[in-house]
Image (spheres, rainbow, N blue to C red):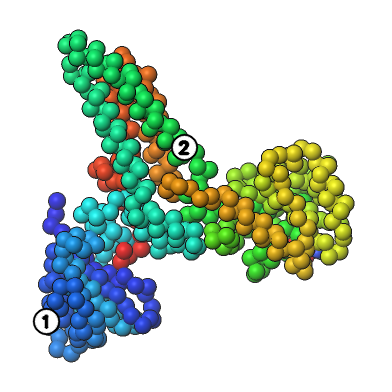
Amino acid sequence: MTTRTTIFALSSAPGRAAVAVFRVSGPDAGGVLDALVSPRPKPRTAAFRRVRAPGETEPFDEALVLWLPGPKTETGEDMAELQLHGGRAVAEAATSALIAAGAVPARPGAFARRAFEAGKLDLTQAEAIADLVDAETEGQRRQAMRQMQGGLGATYDRWRAALLDVIARVEVVIDFPDEGDVADAAGRGLATETVALLDRLAAEMDAHVADARRGERVRDGFQVAILGAPNVGKSSLLNRLARRDAAIVADAPGTTRDVIEVHLGLAGQLVVLADTAGLAEAGRSPGDAIEAEGVRRALARAETADLRLGVVDAGRPETASALAGRLRGGDLVLINKTDSAAPAAAESMIHKQAQGFHVEPPIEVLAGSAATGAGLESLEAALAARVAALAGTAEAPPLTRARHRLAVERAREALARARPRLGDAAELAAEDLRLAARALGEITGRVDVEEILDRVFAGFCIGK
Ligand code: GDP
C-alpha cells in the first residue's frame, strides 16, 4: 500500500455563506495546520487564529481552528478543521494555501471511506451518512439516522456470524471423513441443530426481503401514477397537488404523451407523483403511434407504481371504463370536475366496472375538482394515509438499497443450495455457505471488495 496522503475538502456547501468549513485528514494534518496557523491549538479545543498561506506574512482570513489528533477522530487519522468566512475568494485562498502546505483535494466520499477503512463505520453506516445528507423528508431522515446508528449492519453481521458458525460445524465432517464415529456424530448433529439454524436464518432473510421494498421506497420515494382517459383532468390534478404548473393542461386530448413527475412530501415521506398519457376508454383505440407509445408507457408506469390514482370525469361517466382492470386493492379514484357535473352517475359507473374493482383492500372513491380545488384536501389526506400505510412502522431496520437486496437474495439462494447438500455433499454445502457469508459480508464491507467500495463511495459528495 502506498503511503497515505493528507486530504482536505471544503465540507460545507460552496458559495457565499457565514462560514466555510475546511477539513483536513491524514498523517500530516498537524503539519499542514502548522503551515497555516500558529500556534497549533490545544487538541479538541476551538481557538481563534489568523490564517495565512505558507511563507506569506499577511493572513487571508481569520478562523476558528480545531486540531483533532487521531485515532479518536471520524477518520481515525489526525484531523484539523478550519471554520473560515464563507466567501468564494476565501475558499479559493484556503484551497491554494492547503495545497501549498502539502494537502491534496479529497475525492468524493474520501473522508467516509477513510472512516470505513479505520473500522469506524460499516458500509451500511457510510451509506446512511450519504442518505442523511440527501434526506428531504422526515421519513428519509429517520430511516437514514437508524441505519447510521448501525441497526441494519448489525443484522447482516449477526447472520454472517451464524453462517460462519455453521461452516465451522460442516467442516468438522469434511475434515474427519474417515473417522466414522466423529463424522457420524457430527453428521447427525448437522441434520438436526444445523439444519434448524439454517432454516431460521433463511426465514429471517425471506422476511427481510419480503418487505414490499419499504426501505427503498422511503429512500427513493413512493411511486404514485395518475391514470385515466384523455381529458379527464389528470394534468390539472397533478398541477394542483404539486402547487405549480408542471404538466401542460390543454383542451385537446392526448397532450401528456410522456410521463411527467413531481416530487411531493406527504405523511413525512417523499412521493413521486407521475402524470401519464390518457388511456383509451373501452371500445376506442389510440389515435396514432405516438399516442399508442404514450399509453404503453402509462400502463408500464401504472404497473410498477406503489399506488394508482385513477381519474374519471364526472360529466363523462363512461371515462371510468378506461380504468377497468388497471387498479389494485388500496388504489384511489377521483371523480373530477364535480364543479360542472354531479358525481353520482360516474360513481355508479365506477362500481359497474366489475373487473379490477372488487378487490381487497377496497378502492377508495372520492369526488372533487382539480379546477376549483374542492375535495382535494380529502384526496391528499387519503393519499397520505395510503403512503403512511405503505411506509409502515417496521420494527427491524429495513434494507434501503438494491445493493443490499441483491446481496441478501444471493445469500438466500446459496443457503437454499446448501441445505440439501448438508447430508451427503458436505464439501459443496460448505462452499455454498461460504458464498452466502461472503454475500452478506459485502453489504457491510466485511470482505475485501475494492470494486464495491468504489461504487459505494463514488455516490458521496466531496468533503464527506
Ligand atoms: P388530462 O388530459 O386528463 O391530463 O386533462 P387536463 O388536465 O389536460 O384537462 C383537460 C380539460 O379539462 C382542461 O380544459 C381542463 O381545464 C379541464 N379540467 C380539468 N379539471 C377540471 C375540473 O375539475 N373542472 C372543470 N370544469 N374542468 C376541468
Task: List the residue tagged with mark 2.
Answer: 207
Q: Is residue 199 above or below residue 136?
A: above
Q: Nearer the viewer, residue 230 or 44?
A: 44
Asked if one can make out residue 401 in the rendered structure from this viewpoint, the answer is no
Ligand 1 sits in quadrant: bottom right
User: Percent from the top left, x then y, of residue 175?
Assistant: 18, 19
The kind of residue on which mark 1 rests is Pro
User: How many numbered tags mark residues here?
Assistant: 2
Q: Which residue appears at 20% of the width and 21% of the height?
A: 172
Q: Which residue appears at 75% of the width and 51% of the height?
A: 365
Q: In the displayed structure, does residue 347 sit left or right of residue 397? A: right
Q: Is residue 334 above or below residue 350?
A: below
- Checking the image for residue 39, the label placed there is 1
Q: In the displayed structure, does residue 408 sit left or right of residue 101? A: right
Label 2, ligand 1: CB separation under 8 Å: no
The kind of residue on which mark 2 rests is Ala
